[in-house]
Image: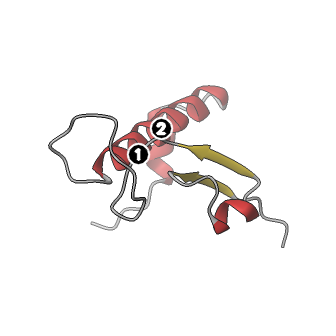
Amino acid sequence: IGAKIGLVTIFPESTVAKFADSVIRLPGVTFKSGLTPNTRSMQPHGNLFEQMSFLLFDCMAVALMDMRNFHVSELFKRHANLE
């Protein structure tokens, strides 16, 4: 259908990455990777990747808002209210 695939991953050599049009590799370690963490953290594996993902997506949202000249109040009107 012509959709583009963007992937954020620890594993840029994964099967999904082969189909992706864009791949962003964030450093991270999971139990599945078999890699040794290169940072010292008390957090379980995967948490650092999840936190970096959150920051990346938050920065992307702010950049898109700036590029499209959207104000937070405009976005709130479009936000689904499930409360």
For label 2, the residue is 56
Residue 83 or 30: which is nearer the viewer? 30
Residue 20 or 29: which is nearer the viewer? 29
Percent coordinates x, y for residue 16 in the rendering: 65, 66
**CA distance separating discs 1 and 2:** 14 Å
Query: As drawn, is 56 to the left or to the right of 18?
Result: left
> Where, by quadrant of the figure, is residue 68 drawn?
top right
Give the farthest residue toward the bottom.
1
Query: As drawn, is 31 to the left or to the right of 74?
Result: left
| Amino acid type assigned to the residue bearing label 2 in the image | Leu
| Amino acid type assigned to the residue bearing label 1 in the image | Gly
Residue 71 or 49: which is nearer the viewer? 49
**Secondary structure category for the residue under label 1:** loop
Please name the residue shown 38% across and 47% down the image.
49
Please name the residue shown 60% across and 34% down the image.
64
Please name the residue shown 84% across and 73% down the image.
1
Please name the residue shown 50% across and 51% down the image.
10
Q: Residues within 10 Å of mark 1 (few under 14, many from 20)?
A: many
Residue 68, relative to residue 77: is it above or below?
above
Percent coordinates x, y for residue 12 in the rendering: 62, 52
